[in-house]
Image (spheres, rainbow, N blue to C red):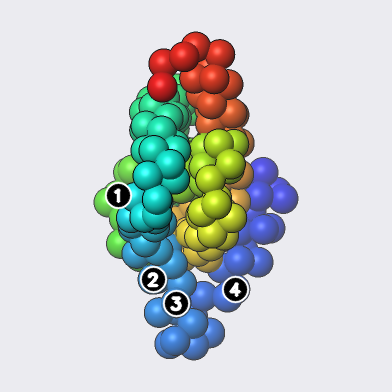
Amino acid sequence: MRLDLALFHAGRRLAGKSHWGDVLIIFAATWLFYLLLLVAIVGAVQGDAAFVHHSLRVLFVTVIALIVAEAISWATSLFWFRMRPFERLRFTPLVWMPPHWKSFPSDHTTIGFTIACTFLFLHHPLASVLLIIASLVAIARVIAGVHYPSDVAAGVVLAGVVSFLTVALTRALPLV
């Protein structure tokens, strides 16, 4: 927990240094997540018929992985609820969050990395772009003060494991 707090405070030191820096952090913590979704969906339906067919399969497997990952995320929060840093440490975050909302694991990170990892494990060419965007969102959520580093780390691990197992299962069983 000490390392988690030390990393959190190190990241938070970047907030409030400049107006434009805060604007970028707010954009990355709030809106970049939606760009990730848009890139995944729009980028998947561009190209020739074979590419679109592969991309639609990737999207289908991604939706399955997302449902499983979010179900596990919410189930985890029922047994291990963690207050958000701004509530526990009593400061105003850079982005608005409803009070008393779960912090662990980070849903933005879980969703972003589930999409990116599923694309990666299914060898989609957008995977690297999605991984970069998901990473920026995760880092910005910590700097903005709405997650601890361990919240986003847990989201990355959860996303990676669920994506890997979902891809493996859909390859083993000819569902798609």
Which residue in the protein does label 2 denote?
27
Q: Position of residue 42 (x, y in %)?
A: 33, 55
C-alpha gap between disc 1 and disc 4: 23 Å
Which amino acid, mark 4?
Answer: Arg
Instruction: State how far apart marks 2 and 4 are (Cα).
Output: 18 Å
Measure the alpha-carbon separation of dots 1 and 3.
23 Å
Instruction: Return the disc, 2 or 4, that comes first in the chain's sequence.
Output: 4
Element marked by disc 1 = loop
Asked which secondary structure carries label 3, the reply is: helix
- CA gap, disc 4 and disc 3: 15 Å
Q: Nearer the viewer, residue 3 or 166?
A: 166
Q: Please say whether residue 100 is visible from this viewpoint.
A: yes
Expressed as whole percent of the image width and height from the top left, the position of residue 45 reads 34, 50
Above-or-below relation of 171 to 83? above
Task: Work out whether mark 4 precedes mark 3 in sequence or the reverse, and give the earlier one.
Answer: 4
Q: Which mark is residue 13?
A: 4
The answer to which of marks 1 and 2 sits earlier in the sequence is: 2
Secondary structure of the residue carrying numbered label 2: helix
Residue lying farthest front?
49
Mark 2 or mark 4: which is in front? Answer: 2
The picture quadrant where one finds residue 123 is: top right
The residue singled out by tag 3 in the image is 24
Give residue 173's mark.
none
The amino acid beneath tag 2 is: Phe
Tell me where residue 69 appears, x and y as whole percent: 45, 30
Q: Quadrant of the C terminus?
A: top left
Q: Badge 1 is on which residue? A: 99
Q: Secondary structure at mark 4?
A: loop
- How far apart are the alpha carbons under marks 1 and 2? 20 Å
